[in-house]
Image (cartoon, rainbow, N blue to C red):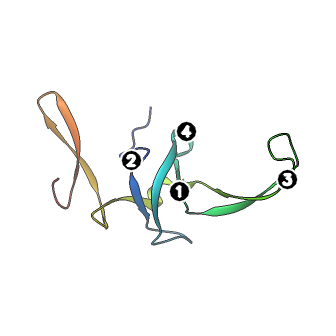
Amino acid sequence: MKKFKLKSGDTVKVIAGDHKGSEGKVLQIIKDKDRVLVEGVNLVSKHTKPSAQSPQGGIVKKEASLHISNVMLVEDGVAVRVGYKVDGDTKSRISKKTKK
């Protein structure tokens, strides 16, 4: 099983690609494809047919996934690398820059 240093709910910054510089919250991590969904970033237009849920149909804006290597965790408005610190039985994530 793959291990990632990001979790759902983390604030991340896009560091590469068309949406470079954008920030948002991680909505979902797709582990088998190494991708993340970030709120408000990489929006695509999806055409939907009329159905019971949306009788009108139409065009819906929706987030598309980004590769996990193109995002970095944000702490105090600055993108930081993530490490781990083990104290006895507890393992916690820390920022490589501030050691917090």
| Residue bearing mark 2 | 6
What residue is at 55 percent from the left and 61 percent from the top?
40
Task: Report whether 25 appears left or right of 100.
Answer: right
Label 2 close to label 3 by CB (< 8 Å): no
Residue at screen point 87% across, 53% down:
56
Name the mark nearer the viewer: 1 or 2.
Answer: 1
| Residue behind mark 3 | 57
Disc 2 and disc 3: Cα gap in Å?
35 Å
Q: Amino acid at mark 2?
A: Leu
Answer with left or right where residue 49 lies relative to residue 12. Answer: right
Residue that mark 4 sits on: 32
User: Dot 1 corresponds to which residue?
Assistant: 39
Q: Give the mark toward the camera: 2 or 3.
A: 3
- Kind of element beneath mark 3: loop
Q: How far apart in space, not on screen, are marks 3 and 1 (Cα)?
A: 23 Å
| Residue 8 in picture, x, y percent from top left | 44, 44
Query: Disc 4 versus disc 2: distance between alpha carbons?
Result: 15 Å
> Which mark is first along the chain, 3 or 2?
2
Sequence-wise first label, 4 or 1: 4
Where in the figure is residue 79, as x and y percent of width and height? Answer: 32, 64
Q: CA distance from mark 3 to mark 4?
A: 31 Å
